Image (tube, rainbow, N blue to C red):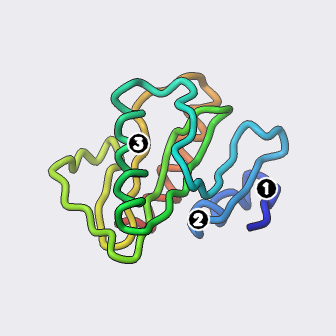
Amino acid sequence: MATTFVNRQTVKAELANLREFKNHSKTFYARWEISCPRPGRLSDADYAKLKAEFALCDLYDGHVYVVYSYATPIAWAAVGPDYDVQTEDRNIDRCHYSRSKYHVTVVDDSFSGTTSKHKGQARAWLCSNAI
C-alpha cells in the first residue's frame, strides 16, 4: 500500500478511510501493521491492550491500522472479517468503541503538546467512523 504525504487538511480523509500516510516532518503517520509494533512511550497497560488487539486479529484473520506520534502508537483500529468485540469498557473519553468489523482505541496519555494535537485528530476522524 502506498504511503501518502499529507497536510493538515488532508490528514482527516486519510484517517477516516484508514489509509497509510505521513505528515511532512514524519512525526505523525499511520500504517497497517502485521505484527505488534514497539511500544514507544506507551504505558504497560496500553501496550498490553495493543498486544491483545493483535492477538485477536491473528485469531480472526484481521488487521490493525496503527496511528503514531513520533514512534509511539497513539491510536489503533482493529479490522477483521468476523471481528465483533464485546466489551464493557465504554468510556467515551477513551474513545474505545466497538462495532462489527471495526474497533478503535485512542490512548489517554499525552506525551507532548504535539502528540496531544495528533491524538485529537486521530480521535475526531477514526472515531467518527467507528460509532
Which of discs 3 and 2 lies nearer the camera? The answer is 3
| Residue sitting at x 49%, y 45% | 75
Q: CA distance from mark 3 to mark 2?
A: 20 Å
Q: Amino acid at mark 1?
A: Val
Q: Amino acid at mark 2?
A: Leu
Which disc, if any, is residue 51?
A: 3
Secondary structure beneath disc 2?
loop
| Residue sitting at x 54%, y 49% | 35
82 vs 23, nearest the viewer: 82
Residue 86's place in the image compared with 105, above or below, is: below
Image spot of residue 19 (x, y percent): 65, 65
Image spot of residue 122 (x, y percent): 54, 50
Q: Amino acid at mark 3?
A: Lys
Q: Which residue is mark 1?
A: 6
Answer few, some or many: residues within 10 Å of disc 3's Cα (few below 14, many 20 plus, some between 14 and 19).
some
Q: Which residue is mark 2?
A: 18
Q: CA distance from mark 2 to mark 1?
A: 13 Å
